[in-house]
Amino acid sequence: MVLEAVNRSLDDIERHLNRAYMETWRYIQVRIGYWKSKIYREHTKQEIIEGAFGRWRNSGRLDY
């Protein structure tokens, strides 16, 4: 019974991580898809990616 609960929790964690990864990947693809060098000349693609991922990572922090 305890082992089943642990396995279920690990499966839930994996499912949440996979979903978060896919949402982040989709967001980055949209940002790159709308990339216009004239508009975003002050930021490189890498800077935009790091900024988006950094905001996502910070929003997911649970301080408890």
Image (cartoon, rainbow, N blue to C red):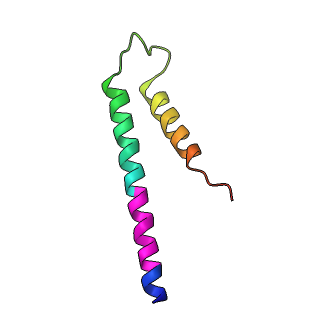
Q: Is residue 64 left or right of residue 34?
A: right
Quarter where residue 27 is shown: top left
* Whether residue 4 is situated above or below residue 49 in the rendered picture: below
* Whether residue 4 is situated above or below residue 17 in the rendered picture: below
Where residue 52 appears, x then y in whole percent?
Answer: 49, 35
Does the magenta segment cover residue 15? yes
* Whether residue 53 is situated above or below residue 9 in the rendered picture: above
Residue at 62% of width from left, 54% of height from top?
62
Residue at 37% of width from left, 28% of height from top?
31
Query: Considering the image in quadrants, where does the C terminus appear?
Result: bottom right
Does the magenta segment cover residue 19? no
In the image, farthest residue toward the bottom: 1
Residue at 36% of width from left, 42% of height from top?
25
In the image, farthest residue toward the top: 38
* Whether residue 57 is situated above or below residue 41 in the rendered picture: below
Where residue 60 appears, x then y in whole percent?
Answer: 55, 49
Quarter where residue 39 is shown: top left
Quarter where residue 15 is shown: bottom left
Query: Considering the image in quadrants, where does the N terminus appear?
Result: bottom left
Of 36 and 23, nearer the camera is 23
Where residue 4 appears, x then y in whole percent?
Answer: 42, 84
Q: Is residue 56 left or right of residue 37?
A: right
Of 44 and 30, nearer the camera is 30
In the image, farthest residue toward the right: 64
> What secondary structure characterizes most of the magenta part?
helix
Residue at 42% of width from left, 67% of height from top?
12
Count up the numbered dots: 0
| First to last magenta residue range | 6-17
